[in-house]
Image (tube, rainbow, N blue to C red):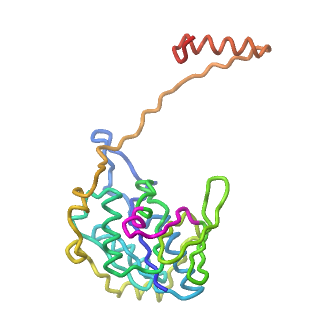
Amino acid sequence: MNIIVCVKQVPDTAEMRIDPVTNNLVRDGVTNIMNPYDQYALETALELKDNMGAHVTVLTMGPPQAEVISRDCLAVGADEAKLITDRAFGGADTLATSAALAYSIKDLGIPDLILCGRQAIDGDTAQVGPEIAEHLDLPQVTGALKVQIKDDEVIVDRDNENTSQTLAMKMPCVVTVMRSPDLRFASIRGKMKARKAEIPHLSADDLHIDHDVIGKAGSPTQVMRSFTPKVVQVHGEIFTDEDPQVAVDKLVAKLIEDKIITK
């Protein structure tokens, strides 16, 4: 069984700040980490490997320094890692990102199972996983709490707001993971192996990707600026008349006075 896990290096949002003049994110001095939801996806893959045997490939798209998290994945038990890195990918929105990942997965060969984190903490769109499935024309389930393999089907328990669902799909398919046990710790042997491992860097040309569908050229959306919303202090008024009808009449009169409602 072959599994591909898509992981992303993201800034630690606990350390994020916004420049008060430019309204842009301040990235200098901010620690980069593996996206926590992608850690859940990786741990899910490693549990499947432990239970039934699987070859786990980690796929990362980002700048060359993202190789750090690729090695972290190898250290905990992934079998191989590949880094998609090219300036041509810069400025990509979720559609262009998913297109690049989908092209890469096609180049590697469609696996039995593709796992992604439910969302990235630096964007919170939860779009890349489903878009990969759309590009590859594969069935998908999002928000997985538990993933099992039975015969040639993937059985997924998924979050559905106040309830949960259990769904089955034929492989190959895509699953985005919302929760799992925390990612296991790397052993000393695993760390040594990861340090020596060769991680291929793949460019857009290596993957024969059409440049019109990646980077800024392939991005129909762009983030113009980021800012911290101003907090407006509003003092409420409480009507405590013993007669509820009197209190309601006063409330309605106040709402009309403040032009919140009309007669």
| 263 relative to 5, above or below | above
Q: Position of residue 106 (x, y in %)?
A: 34, 76
| 240 relative to 210, above or below | above
- Residue closest to the far right: 242
Please indicate whether residue 186 sits to the left or right of residue 242 in the image.
left
Using the rendered view, name the quadrant where residue 136 is placed: bottom left
Q: Position of residue 25 (x, y in %)?
A: 33, 49
The magenta span reads: 131-144
Q: Position of residue 154 (x, y in %)?
A: 57, 75
Please indicate whether residue 220 sits to the left or right of residue 139 in the image.
left
- Of 34 and 149, the residue lying toward us: 149
* Residue at x 61%, y 56% (from the top left corner): 160
Q: Position of residue 17 (x, y in %)?
A: 38, 48
- Of 218 and 229, the residue lying toward us: 218
* Residue at x 61%, y 81% (from the top left corner): 150
Q: Quadrant of the C terminus?
A: top right
Please indicate whether residue 217 sits to the left or right of residue 29 in the image.
left
